[in-house]
Image (cartoon, rainbow, N blue to C red):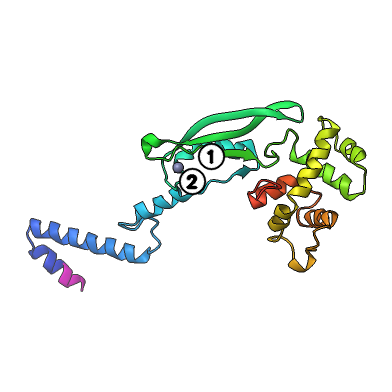
Amino acid sequence: MCFLYCLIVEEMSLFVKVLFCVGLFSLWLIFLNLLCPENPFPRGEAPREISVWYHIGMKKFYKSTDQIENVRENCRSIRCPKCGKVEVLRRHGYRTGYINNKRVIRCWRLYCDPRGGGCGHTPSLRLCGVLRGRSFSGKVLGLFIEALVMGYSMQSAWDYCKCASSLRTGYRTYHWLRHNESNIRNALYEFIDVRDMNTDASSFIALLELFKKAFKDYNISAFQLKTQKNFGFP
Ligand SMILES: [Zn+2]
């Protein structure tokens, strides 16, 4: 074999020798390619791999400001929740307000820019403990609900949660909860065995107990984070 190889190589001109080496090298490359089929970027498929990155959906509630900042940094890679387009969202400031008597950022906003083909919608990103239209946090509401379940009077329950607002807000919150009872019930269906669910309209306290069972210690933040819905709203 070796003799045959030497005979062939010695008989060849320089040009044929070069061609022969190139051929051998090509064969070696093909052999390597067969050995490594898990090549992360096979020819022609790289754009499809990268395009997956653009399919990130936007959430309404986030656990931390770091997560929200990260989303805002990479907002161009996020799909608009209204029109579904990508590469059209851009940062759009934030809205401040009072929660538990402190001035805080209530929500951060993005803007679906019509100049880039967007719809003009301004979706907002919020921390999971922020309640829609309320001047107290989810933690305070959780404590209020806990006191109601323990059988406290309205005055005592409102004192128990140490909310900075007046007792009138306490009464309003109670009636708001009663009014949106069915929305809370519907949201809990996902997390509770239906047989545990008491469908009796008067069992408001039983519903709140079920809420505790599903989210532990009347955790409104966990509810909003998991369901991605405003507490008490459809
Ligand atoms: Zn849009």
**Magenta residues (range):** 1-5
The main secondary structure of the magenta stretch is helix
Residue 3 is a magenta residue: yes
| Whether label 1 touches label 2, CB < 8 Å | yes
Vertical order, 29 against 127 (above or below) = below
Could you say which is closer to the camera, residue 27 or residue 98?
A: 98
As measured in the structure, the alpha-carbon distance from the residue carrying label 1 to the one carrying label 2 is 8 Å
Q: Secondary structure at mark 2?
A: loop
Whether residue 119 appears in magenta in the rendering, the answer is no
Q: Residues within 10 Å of mark 1 (few under 14, many from 20)?
A: some
| Residue drawn at point x = 18 percent, y = 62 percent | 23
Q: Residues within 10 Å of mark 2 (few under 14, many from 20)?
A: few
First-in-chain label (1 vs 2): 2
Where, quadrant-wise, is the N terminus in this rendering? bottom left
Which residue is painted at 42% across and 35% down in the image? 113
Number of numbered discs: 2
Q: Amino acid at mark 2?
A: Lys
Q: Out of 226 and 33, give the one closest to the viewer.
A: 226
Residue 173 screen position, x and y as percent: 79, 40
Relative placement, left or right, of 86 versus 19 is right
Query: In the image, what residue type sits under mark 1?
Result: Pro
Residue 82 numbered mark, or none: 2
Residue 119 picture quarter: top left
Displayed quadrant of residue 175: top right
Task: Report x, y in % for residue 5.
Answer: 17, 69
SS for dot 1: loop
Provide the residue designation for mark 1. Answer: 123
User: Residue 153: which numbered mark, if any?
Assistant: none
234 w.r.t. 67: above or below: below
Residue 35, placed above or below residue 80: below
